[in-house]
Image (spheres, helix red, strand yellow):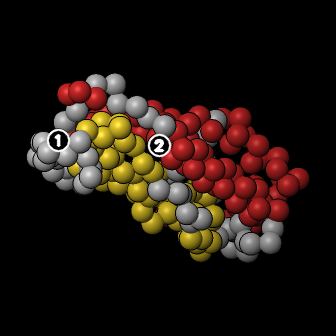
Amino acid sequence: MRLVATLLLLAASPFAHAADPALPPCAQAVRFMADWFDDPSQEFDKTSDFLVRQGAPAGEGATALGLVTVEDAISVVPEKSCRGLTVQLRFVHPVLRVIRDLPPGTCAHEHVLRHEYTHVRIYREMARRFRELVYPFPDSATPDDVLRYARQQLAQLQESQRLFDSPEEYAGNLTACKGEIPKLLMAARKGG
């Protein structure tokens, strides 16, 4: 139900900002780029417990129904044709899962799938907003400082994922599809 992101830090070259002084300065001292968030692969054969181990939130008595996982990789590299830095955000191995207790073709499955694809859309919006970032101290930009700033900004952008997973959003699972989700979960617990 909730998008999980692991931030991978790619080593930023310690000499990145000390690029060849013969190069002209870049139009932007620090440029932010983000890959497109691809359509995730889908898995519909996992258990709720598996999703919880992958990071799905599930409070006491709750059942994790779906989850999108992805790793975020951020790198800071020197520009090649001018003096400046590029911050690159990549999305690695996105996977969308819906538990096997909600079989494809059911209204319950489609309901959870819609929820998870909203997380995908939020991630795409996060990428767009990341590309619009402006580093506040361009004259003193070091790779480490820029990486720290990029990580802070990404953490703020990821807050939109948590906000989408509101109690109201989750409460709708009880009544969606004329109560089909609780019925399917009960049937799975009873063995069919």
Q: Position of residue 4 (x, y in %)?
A: 47, 51
Residue 18 lies left or right of residue 85; in this view the side is left
Instruction: Determine which of the numbered discs, if any, sits on residue 98 in the image.
Output: none
Figure label count:
2
Q: Secondary structure at mark 1?
A: loop
Looking at the image, which is closer to me, 68 or 51?
A: 68
Residue 25 placement (x, y as % from top left): 25, 38
- Image check: 48 left or right of 144? right
Query: Where does residue 178 sit, x and y in percent of width and height?
Result: 88, 53
Q: Amino acid at mark 1?
A: His
Quadrant in the picture for the C terminus? bottom right
Q: Residues within 10 Å of mark 1 (few under 14, many from 20)?
A: some
Report crowding for label 2: few under 14, some 14 to 19, many 20 or more residues within 10 A (C-alpha): some
Which comes before the other along the chain, label 1 or label 2? 1
Q: Secondary structure at mark 2?
A: helix
Residue annotated with mark 2: 131
Instruction: Using the rendered view, name the quadrant where residue 113 is placed.
Output: bottom right
Q: CA gap, disc 1 to disc 2?
A: 20 Å
Which of the two discs, 1 and 2, sits closer to the camera? 1
122 left or right of 69 in image: right
Q: Is residue 186 visible?
A: no
At 20% from the left and 28% from the top, the residue drawn is 140
Quadrant of residue 128 within the rendered picture: top right
Residue at the spot of label 1 = 17
From the top left corner, tell me how far across and down residue 21 is, in percent. 12, 42
**For the residue marked with disc 2, what is the amino acid?**
Arg
Dot 1 and dot 2 residues touching (CB under 8 Å): no
In the image, is residue 53 above or below residue 153? below
User: Is residue 6 or residue 85 the one in the foreground?
Assistant: 85
In this picture, residue 175 sits left or right of residue 115: right
